Image (spheres, rainbow, N blue to C red):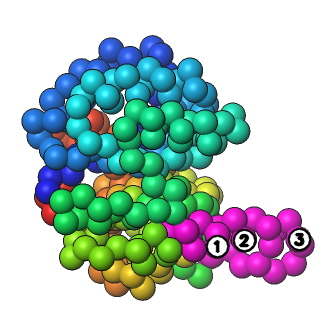
């Protein structure tokens, strides 16, 4: 299976024509399109609707997770409903199998990496914050545990490792993802991990257990040589 992956489209109406030409050939190049979150800029149905028009017209099976921007207006449930109605497979702590390849996905959350992972100690507000991070981790674990396919792909918005956020300001690393997600990947095993969110991070890295991790934020893909709007993976 050839997977075309991208993230952080941050779609607004002014980008309609640009996105249309960006996706015009994806169907010839891949069997499946993965969108790893931040599809919209402000999480508005008015942004999602024209985006879905473009995606539907590109006529490629599409799998997506939401990102933090898609939550900005509190309309994430409505957005997910719109996406499902348009035929997009939305992963939110869920799994999906297609042609022998398993996809498990969720948005993920912040929390930091390695020894810097924030722990549930002290004020109730900190505990709540950490719990939100743990909850997303558990959602990923449940989704991955459902997969029965030999090939396993993980789709998340936030980074599961520190390596693919290098290049961003060190002060914001804890807000770009958490290695709690990476620990789940290593417990369950994955052949390919796709994420976005770190617009100025690095293109690739590995979990401690050796699973390959790719940051497919569109800004990064467009700054590659040659520039592209999505990256193709063979699995
Ligand atoms: Fe983003
Ligand atoms: Fe994001």
Using the rendered image of the protein, determine whether residue 140 is visible from the camera's viewpoint.
Answer: yes
Q: Where's residue 148, x and y in %? A: 30, 76
Q: Where's residue 40, x and y in %? A: 51, 32
Q: Earlier in the sequence, mark 3 or mark 1?
A: 3
Secondary structure mostly seen in magenta is: helix
Question: Residue at left 75%, top 65%?
Answer: 129
Q: Residues within 10 Å of mark 1 (few under 14, many from 20)?
A: many
Q: Where 34 sits versus 82, above or below?
A: below
Residue occupied by mark 2: 131
Q: Where's residue 78, x and y in %? A: 60, 36
Residue 110 shown left or right of residue 120 in the figure: left
Q: Quadrant of the C terminus?
A: bottom left
Helix, strand or loop under label 2: helix
Q: Residue 93's mark?
A: none
Q: Is residue 129 magenta?
A: yes
Question: Residue at left 55%, top 31%?
Answer: 41
Is 121 or 68 nearer to us in this picture? 68
Disc 2 from disc 1: Cα separation: 5 Å
Q: Where 18 sits versus 56, above or below?
A: above
For the residue with label 3, is its CB less than 8 Å from the closest atom of ligand 2? Answer: no
Q: Which range of residues does the magenta coloring cover?
A: 116-140
Q: Where 179 sits versus 82, above or below?
A: below
Dots 2, 1 in contact, CB < 8 A: yes
Disc 3 from disc 2: Cα separation: 10 Å
Residue extending farthest to the front is 85
Residue occupied by mark 1: 134
Write down the quadrant of residue 210 in the picture.
Answer: bottom left
Residue occupied by mark 3: 124
């Amino acid at each position: 299976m050839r997977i075309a992956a991208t993230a952080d489209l941050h779609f607004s109406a002014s980008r309609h024509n640009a996105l249309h030409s960006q996706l015009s050939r994806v169907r010839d190049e891949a069997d499946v399109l993965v969108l790893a979150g931040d599809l919209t800029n402000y999480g508005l149905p008015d942004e999602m609707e024209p985006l879905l028009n473009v995606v539907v017209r590109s006529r490629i099976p599409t799998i997506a997770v939401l990102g933090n921007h898609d939550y900005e207006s509190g309309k994430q449930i409505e957005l997910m409903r719109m996406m499902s109605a348009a035929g997009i497979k939305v992963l939110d702590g869920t799994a999906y199998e297609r042609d022998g390849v398993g996809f498990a996905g969720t948005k993920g959350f912040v929390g930091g990496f390695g020894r810097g992972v924030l722990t549930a100690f002290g004020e109730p507000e900190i505990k709540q914050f950490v719990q939100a991070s743990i909850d997303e981790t558990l959602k990923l674990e449940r989704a991955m545990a459902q997969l029965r396919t030999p090939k396993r792909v993980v789709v998340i918005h936030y980074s599961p490792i520190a390596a693919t956020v290098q290049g961003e300001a060190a002060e914001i690393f804890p807000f770009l993802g958490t290695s709690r997600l990476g620990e789940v990947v290593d417990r369950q095993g994955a052949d390919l991990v796709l994420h976005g969110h770190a617009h100025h991070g690095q293109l690739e890295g590995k979990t401690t257990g050796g699973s390959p991790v790719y940051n497919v934020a569109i800004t990064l893909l467009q700054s590659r040589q040659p520039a592209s709007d999505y990256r193709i993976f063979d699995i």
